[in-house]
Every structure is written in structure tokens, then in C-alpha cells.
Image: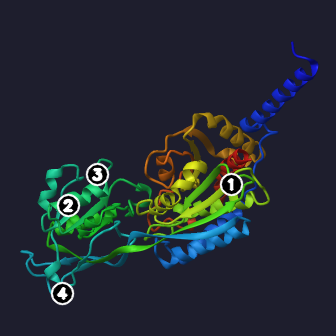
Amino acid sequence: MFGIPAVVTAILLVTTVVISVNSLIGNDEGILLIGFDHEMAGEHVRNLVQWGPRMTGSEAESLGADYISRQFEDAGLQDVHIETFQVPMFEVVTAELSLVEYYPLKNVPRPFGQTVQFTHMEEFVIQGYSGSLASSDFRGDLEVVDIGNGTDPGSYSRSRGMVCFIEQTVDTPGNVVVYENAFSAGASAIILQNLMRGEEIGYLPMFKTSQYHEPEQAARDIPFMMVSKDCGDEILQRTSGSFKLRMDIEVRTGNMDCRVVVGDLKGKSDDGMIVFGAHHDTCYNTIGAVDNTVGPATLIEIARGMNGRTPKSTIRFATFGGEEEGLYGSIEYYKAHRAEFQDTVDLYINFDMAHVDPDTNSFTVTTTRNSTIPVLEDIRDKLLRKDPTLSRYEISVVYDDMRWAASDHWPFVNGGHHAMGGWGSGCIEYHTYKDDLTNLNPESLQIGGRILGSYALMTAS
């Protein structure tokens, strides 16, 4: 039999375990919600977009990285620095697209014929790693052939020496496949007509990349662009008559600087680390207020909400360039720190468009471990009790293996790490020139910021 002291000791041990478990599963006594100033988060977004699109390698991206670095320092993070990696990148130097009127046989343009000029960014957008074509007179003007939605590989052969025009639907192959098929068929250029995304805003042209990684693929030197539905309809209608298409496209490719901003909330121990991440770059054609300026803005306010805390494990904050062209920043950063991360990183938390569109109300937290769902739901529920105004948002916590290579969680998940993500409804204007401040809903940034920030601080402590 156990003596009384042993029984008391056992009771104390059990009580300690119960208290510890309660802290983890999140009863109200065990949950500490971090502070989060959503108005300040909105101000960070407004400050970051002032320099225009933060295309990786651009001056605007450099200025944005410097701003984030200063804010990390002001939030009390330590060892704040910017790491730079050379990655294959592109720069759109010239982008002109027009229709030129010809005589009926289409061998000579009319001297005083009609010319229709399309507006870059608004009516057409260059796709990632497009080639170039300088055409300033009729000798470079092109006929257009419509091959449908591009799902029939044999149809591309009809585009030899012409513009390969594809009506983009949900079944259309990705940019890499389209580019390879059209180039191999001898097409002179590629146009995707957006018939798939953004009906509410007129099927605006969107930027997407082709994510080539091998140097020899740069030889696919033909222009590649997306046009709006209206622009595409006009091209098809007029080129079926007496018009040809003229384009002057110059895209420079080469290695450029990709920046990663890093700062730490230092822990008491060297055991374990939680990493918060968000990409700070935007597509070349937009200031990207939602995609993804809200990401670094959220990280800054999470860091400020943790200021003065000393967790057991270090919590690292990182923002990445190069996401929009192929996750270059996060991939290179992970590779550079792989040995360190394999032994220390317990969890990676990603913020990509963790924002709720003013016209919708859904927000989703994903986790690669089912066992963490009850904890996250408890934190969510306490947040809603503390701030009932947030009850108008539908906040879900779900399992997801997060193995899809569409954001910066991928190198961490691919490296075997547990991951979480905050995913809002984004905005239908993403990757278009209309992803601007009119879509910003700062209030919604605290949803992912406080739920995932509070979880990280609890876990690290």
C-alpha cells in the first residue's frame, strides 16, 4: 500500500497534469488571447502598397522588405535581418498589343486603316517567364487561330506561325503545359482568354506563372499573355475579318535578388521552434493589397501582440519574396536552413490572403494534425465570446494535409513539418490590377492573427 505522503504526491502530480492538459486543450483559464490591433494592420497594408507592385527583385520589393524589417524591430523581435537569394526572375520592360486593319487579302495594312490599342494590365497581362517579340511594323503582324480550350494536344499544330488563342476554362491545362504545347507546335505567341475567373468584375486578365526551373526552358521565347473576355472577343471578331494582331513584348529574364525578412521572439530554450510565414511580394501587375500585403501586416501585429512575452521555444517570423513566380523565397530559405530546421521546427504557420472579402464572411484555419482541431476551436470560441462582433464571420477549423504547392507552407510540409494556415476568402480581384485598397477589410485580419498567434504562444510556452 502507498503511504499518505505518496498518495498526496500522486494527487498533486495528477492535478498538475490535468492543469497542464487543460492549458493545452483551452478552457478559458488556460487560453491567453494575444493582442492584435487590426487598425494598425490596415495601416501597414496602406504603407506597404505606396511603392506600387512589389515584384520580386524590384525596388518596391526592397523598400517593402525594409519596412517589414523596421516593424519587426519595433515589435521587439531580435536578430532581425534580411537574407537575400539569387533566383531566376523576369521583368516586363515593354508590353504593347494592338489590332491593325488590312486590305481584304491581308497582305498589306491599310495606310489610314483603323488601329485598336489594348491597355496593358487592364485588358492584357503578361504571364510568368513569357518570351519577347518586337514588332513595330506589318512584317511582324500575326494571324490568330482559336484552338478552343487547349485540352486537345493535336489542336496546337494549327497555330504554327500564328497566335495560339485559347479560351481558358476550368479544363484548360496549366500554363506550363500550354506553353510547352504551343511552343513545340511552332506558335509565334500565346493568348489565354479568361472565361473562368471573376465574372463579377468582367473576367479581367490575371497574372499566373509557368514556374520553369531548368535553364534550357528559357529558350521558349514566345510571348505569353492573358486577355480579358471582352478583349479576347474583340481579337477573335476582328481577326476573323481584315485585322491582324501586332505586339511589342520585351521580357528580360535572369537571376535577381529575392529577399526574406526574419526576426525572432527568443525563447528560454534552444529546443523547438515555431515559424510564422507570409509572402511579401506581389504580382507585377498589382499592388496586391489582399494578395498578399495582408500577410506581412498580420505577422507584424502578431509579433506586437506577443511583445514582452518570453516563451520556452523561439517563435520566428519570416516574410518571403518570390512566391508568385514559384515559391522561390521560402524554398531557398528552407534549403539554406534545412539542417537547423530538421531538428528544431515543430510547426510552420502560413498566412496567405488570410483576409475576408467584404462581400463574404468565411475564414478557414487548416492544420495537418487532427489532434490540434479541438484546441484551435476552443481559442476560436473564446475569441468570439470576447468579441461578439466577429460572430458574423463563419470561422472553420479543418484538417488538410497542405501538400499542395501553392503557397509558402509547401517547403516546410515537404520537409516533414507540421503546418497550419489562415485562409480567408481573399478577394475575387486577386492577381488583377483591381486588388487594391478598396477591397481591404482590416477587421478580418485579427481572426487568423489571434487564433493562430494565441495557439503558437500557448504551444511555445
Residue 213 location (% of width, % of height):
33, 61
* Mark 4 lies on residue: 112
* Mark 2 lies on residue: 182
Circles 4 and 2: CB atoms closer than 8 Å: no
Identify the residue shown where x is 23% and y is 59%: 180
Circles 3 and 2: CB atoms closer than 8 Å: no
First in residue order: circle 2 vs circle 1: 2
Q: Amino acid at mark 4?
A: Phe
Query: Residue 8's image quarter?
Result: top right
Residue 259 location (% of width, % of height):
52, 70
First in residue order: circle 3 vs circle 1: 3
* Mark 3 lies on residue: 173
CA separation, marks 4 and 2? 34 Å
Identify the residue shown where x is 49% and y is 44%: 402
Q: Disc 1 or disc 4, which is closer to the eye?
A: 1
Specify the quadrant that holds the N terminus.
Answer: top right
Residue 64 visible in rendering: yes
Q: Disc 3 or disc 4, which is closer to the eye?
A: 3
